[in-house]
Image (cartoon, grey):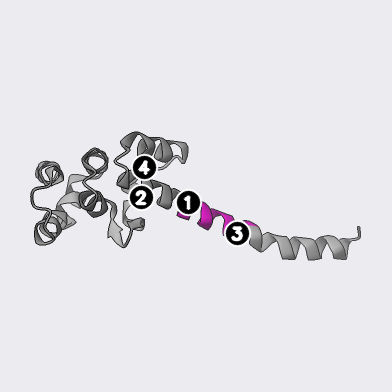
Amino acid sequence: MNFKTLTLIAVVVSPLFAIAPASADDQIAQSLCAYVAANDKNSIRKTLSDSKLRIKNVYDGIQCDGLPMIRFAIKHNAADAAEFIVKQLPGSQVSKSGDVEWAQSNGFAASPIIETIKARSAS
């Protein structure tokens, strides 16, 4: 192979490597949403750990069916997953989220997750 061929291959192949991290991030987000819906906090913990991520660093960037993860958990009655997420987020972020008000206005006022959110918001 000559230099021109190697350069051409590098130019064609290099964009493919730039796309890979975005699809990996999407896969992690999809996995986290599936684990929240299944109320599987151990898999949430393992996925975050394997990816060397902290929930507080990625929470704002993940939407599950257009909802933040806590609201998605409330909708799916995933109390264990929601409790794990709430405990990993700063109390100030939890209190500013409006999740309690959202739950009450959408028919989820009896959800046990609401008490977890209120307790974390108070801390």
In magenta, the rendered stretch is: 17-26
Expressed as whole percent of the image width and height from the top left, the position of residue 37 reads: 31, 47
Residue 7's tag is none
Expressed as whole percent of the image width and height from the top left, the position of residue 109 reads: 8, 52
Crowding at dot 2, Cα within 10 Å, few <14 / some 14-19 / many 20+, comes out as: many
- Label 2 or label 4, whichever lies nearer to me, is 2
Question: Which residue type carries mark 3?
Answer: Ala
Question: Which residue type carries mark 2?
Answer: Cys
- Label 1 or label 3, whichever lies nearer to me, is 1
Question: Which residue matches tag 3?
Answer: 18
**Quarter of the figure that contains the N terminus:** bottom right
Expressed as whole percent of the image width and height from the top left, the position of residue 22 reads: 51, 57
Horizontal side of residue 96 vs 39, given as left or right: left
- First in residue order: circle 2 vs circle 1: 1
Crowding at dot 4, Cα within 10 Å, few <14 / some 14-19 / many 20+, comes out as: few
Question: Which residue type carries mark 1?
Answer: Gln
Question: Is 18 in the magenta?
Answer: yes
State the predominant SS element of the stretch in magenta: helix
Question: Is 54 in the magenta?
Answer: no
Expressed as whole percent of the image width and height from the top left, the position of residue 112 reads: 12, 42
Horizontal side of residue 123 vs 25, given as left or right: left
Assign a secondary structure to mark 4: loop
Question: Which residue matches tag 4?
Answer: 54
- Name the one closer to the observer, 90 or 55: 55
- Name the one closer to the observer, 109 or 70: 109
- First in residue order: circle 3 vs circle 4: 3
Residue 33's tag is 2
Residue 27's tag is 1
